[in-house]
Amino acid sequence: MSATDAPPNPWFSWDYVERNADDIQRALGQHVSLTVQAVVLALVVALPLAGVAHLRPRLAGPVVGTAGVLYTIPSLALFALLAPYTGIGRTTVLIGLVLYALLVLVRNVLVGLAGVDPAVTDAARGMGYGRVRMLLQVELPQALPSVVAGVRVATVTTVALVTVGVVVGYGGLGQLMFRGFRSDYHAEIMTATVLCVLLALVADLLVVLVGRLLMPWRAWRVDRAVA
Amino acid sequence: MDLLTEAFAWLNDPLNWSGRNGVLALTAAHLQVTLLAVLLAGLVALPAGVWLGRARRGGTLGVVVANTTRALPTLALLTLLASAGLFGNTATVLACAVFAVPPLLTNTVTGLAGVDRDVLDAARGLGMSGGRRLWLVELPLAVPLVAAGVRTAVVQVLATVPLAALVGGRSLGSVVVSGFATQRYGQVLAGGLLVAALCLVAEGLLALAQRAVTPRGVRDAARRTGSRRTRRALTAADPVPGVAAAGSRRSNGTAR
């Protein structure tokens, strides 16, 4: 900006995008696959965990507490703690992402389960539902709005968090940001940032749509999560 | 196990603790950046939150702010600011301040908007002016949520500052990043432990501080109606998919 003889260093450059399409695509693909895997894995772990904690309320405190402590540990520190054991690369990033998404999901599932109308569970009990069947067929469907809200938050945070993976050399779009910073190439950073935010928005939208398909009985006037 | 011994050897070496890039100096820098970032964010978010909360507006704004900052990766903001010419810790302070705004804003708004209208009517009936109502009634009642917001913000910033080491900021994160760069994994582990410990200790201390600043009456009332209030705190700060999940977690954690 100040030096007149410096080469132009624009923030937005279509030229850069065209010339590096392959590279960008690879980073984006890495980002997407990491996000999807992390959220799905976290959900697979979180649902049974929250279910058990709901059936045995005494476990709820320790489960949420442990998750809370894990969540307090910064991402950089977590990767630093994991990397020496799980190595540099994908596994480390994935474990970190799953752990962070887990807290959001467990909490939201638990809140959803606790918020089920007692009249509904009473009715189910009256109809002879056992505890486990009630959880699966009555309470979980009732808790879906809260679960979906949790998945939305988890997805968006995961998209943002993947970038921190650069410290172990596997950060999806974060890789581009960091390289752009290293070589002082503005367009690369900006492109990666914009893509990252767009990806978060698109993913969020997709989760909302899936949620609507799963819950056709709800009136979708205002999109408001029930917490 | 070998790595663990290496990490403790690193931590045990007094040379790693003193000096310009020693643990003590880096911790000080870390805390200083955190303090500045939270102050900066508070300067913007607290007055705005009070105003919006009193007007019983701003729910949507809070959600929008929270959602946007959540989708924006910290690393993106840091690299953007750093390569825009704000090197070192200026970029860090600004970036972290941006991420500290949502918990402060949403919790202040919810806290003030949650004040019982009957209580306000009573205060008006006693002849209190708007300003006195704010100071003597509304703010004390909102303190638990506002304090929870501050706590979330501080811990979140403490956790974000280490990332700045990637773009040249000085903090405890530097230990981790330089460890990765030189492939000394004992040092990486030691740095990770230090950063994690700092955040956990801060979280604990702030929980105590939050208890201390909550007016006794509010605390007693909370204890009496224990579970109901917990649930309200949960709903209050929980998403509408967005309002800092962290915020709700902490306000919940303390109400318990």
Image (cartoon, coloured by chain):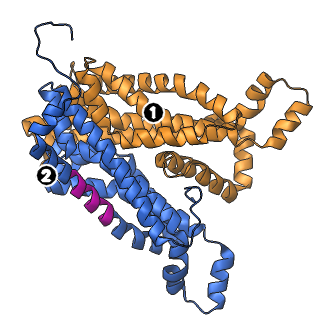
- Dot 2, how many residues are within 10 Å of its Cα: few (below 14), some (14-19), or many (20+)? some
Amino acid type assigned to the residue bearing label 2 in the image: Gly
Amino acid type assigned to the residue bearing label 1 in the image: Ala
Q: Which quadrant of the figure has residue B214?
A: top right
User: Which residue is rendered at x = 23% and y = 28% of the image?
Assistant: A12
* Subunit that carries the residue with mark 1: B
Residue B53 shown left or right of residue A175 in the figure: right
Q: Colour of chain B?
A: orange
* Subunit that carries the residue with mark 2: A
| Disc 2/disc 1 C-alpha distance (Å) | 30 Å
The quarter of the image holding the N terminus of chain A is top left
Q: Furthest-bottom residue in view? A: A128
User: Which residue is rendered at x = 16% and y = 31% of the image?
Assistant: A180
User: Which residue is rendered at x = 46% and y = 27% of the image?
Assistant: B38
Q: In what element is the residue under mark 2?
A: loop
Residue A34: in magenta span? yes
Residue beneath label 2, please?
A89
Q: Position of residue B253 (x, y in %)?
A: 54, 51
Q: In what element is the residue under mark 1?
A: helix
Q: Position of residue B18 (x, y in %)?
A: 22, 22
Which range of residues does the magenta coloring cover? A31-41
- Dot 1, how many residues are within 10 Å of its Cα: few (below 14), some (14-19), or many (20+)? many
- Residue A178 or B43: which is nearer the viewer? A178
Camera sees residue B132: yes
Q: Position of residue B5 (x, y in %)?
A: 15, 47
In the image, is residue A66 above or below residue B140? below
- Residue B201 or A226: which is nearer the viewer? A226
- Checking the image for residue B100, the label placed there is 1
Q: Position of residue B234 (x, y in %)?
A: 59, 53
In the image, which lettered chain appears blue? A
